[in-house]
Amino acid sequence: MRLWRNSAMSRPRAAGPPSSRVRVASADEIPPDTLRAVATDVGPVVLVNLDGDIYALEDRCSHQDYPLSAGELEDGELECAFHGARFDVCTGRATQLPAVVPVRTFPVEVQGGEVFIRLD
């Protein structure tokens, strides 16, 4: 078994292809300072356009499993609409209680106006 590293956490992974890159949206579907929920093989993901840079996080608050895509973006943090937990968009780090556990992040690539994330 190999370990892989995400910016916020490590998880065991079965041997296989080095990564799984999937198209999730067009860049123009995510204007600056907005959120967009997308479905993936690993579950829901929220795409965040922070000042023109796109980030991808697990669309699940680590406090009580509510969708982060229902929240609001402020000062580089995504706030859960249900209990006010906040997460750093770039790293997934929990920055405000009641959440203390980070959310998973995914590497993002924008090519030819299309947004891809790596699900590895």
Image (cartoon, rainbow, N blue to C red):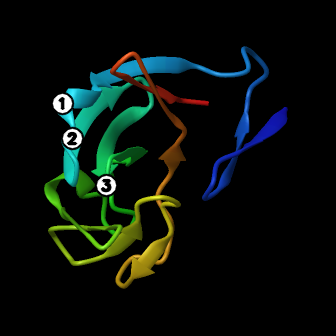
* Badge number at residue 29: 1
How far is disc 1 from disc 3 in space, using C-alphas? Answer: 14 Å
Q: Nearer the viewer, mark 3 or mark 2?
A: 3
Q: With respect to residue 66, does 12 lie above or below?
A: above
Residue 104 is situated, as x and y percent measured from the top left of the image, at: 50, 51
Callout 1 touching callout 2 (CB < 8 Å): yes
Residue 82: percent from left, percent from top: 16, 70
Tag 1 and tag 3, C-beta contact below 8 Å: no
Image position, residue 76 (x, y; %): 35, 67
Residue 36 shows which numbered tag?
2
Asked whether, in this view, residue 120 is left or right of residue 80, the answer is right
* Disc 3 element: loop
Q: As shown in the figure, which amino acid type bears the numbered disc 2?
A: Arg
Say which residue label 3 marks: 51
Please identify the quadrant where the C terminus is shown: top right
Disc nearer the start of the sequence (1/2) = 1
Going by the image, does 38 lie left or right of 104?
A: left
